[in-house]
Amino acid sequence: MSTLASRFLSPEEYLEIERKAEDKSEYYKGEMFAMSGVSRRHDRIAVQLTFLFAQHLRGKRCEAFTANMRVLAVPTGLYTYPDLSVACDEPQFADPHVDTLTNPTLLVEVLSPSTENYDRGKKAKLYRAIPSLQELLFIAQDSYEVELYRRQPDGTWSLIEARGLESAIALTSIGYTLSLRELYERVLGDSENAGS
């Protein structure tokens, strides 16, 4: 990601620019960062997960949002676009524009080589500071594996991993068990290699 502005921007200035922009940018501590594009494999995984969540959440109180919904990581001030977010309480938004979710229950990032270190490091730390967040799911696109961080009752986070197409992982925040075979269904047989 590259910095877009050469001067400090307030969150209000960022939002004014972002709402008019053709491409998405993240914002943190006065700086805007251009988001990189995604690969076909990344997009297929995100679309498949959106489909699976939509089926599961139909008629339930939780609501899923795609990567077009901006999330404000309260109280850290990070504005970003997770690949998927779910709110299980009444969705709350940063302002009347209703385009910046502030109370996600579950966040999902499909990892890309160019942003994986940031997603797993700084961004994950900022996400975990969100009071409403219960689970944070990372999905690999170059192998069949996922990592789930789950908030414990004492506020600490535990890590649960699932590897291989016969594996599954329980997303307790939304009452759903995610099958890796179903998740990776759209990328099975891609010409790109994926480990099993």
Image (spheres, helix red, strand yellow):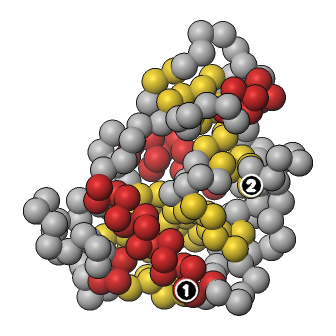
Which of the two marks, 2 or 1, is nearer to us in this view?
1
Q: Looking at this view, name the residue that lies furthest to the right.
A: 96
Numbered circles on residues, count: 2
Name the residue: 16% across, 66% down: 190
Image quarter of the N terminus = top left
Amino acid at the residue labelled 1: Gln
Name the residue: 29% across, 55% down: 40
Amino acid at the residue labelled 2: Leu
In the rendered image, is residue 148 in sight? no
> In the image, 98: left or right of 184?
right
The label shown at residue 55 is 1
For label 2, the SS is strand
Residue 187 position by quadrant:
bottom left
Name the residue: 49% across, 66% down: 137
Does residue 35 sit above or below 2 in this rendering?
below
Image quarter of the C terminus = bottom left
> In the image, 80: left or right of 122?
right
Q: Which residue is mark 2?
A: 101
> In the image, 108: left or right of 11?
left
Q: Position of residue 130 (x, y in %)?
A: 72, 55
Does residue 81 sit above or below 141 in this rendering?
above
C-alpha distance separating marks 2 and 1: 22 Å
For label 1, the SS is helix
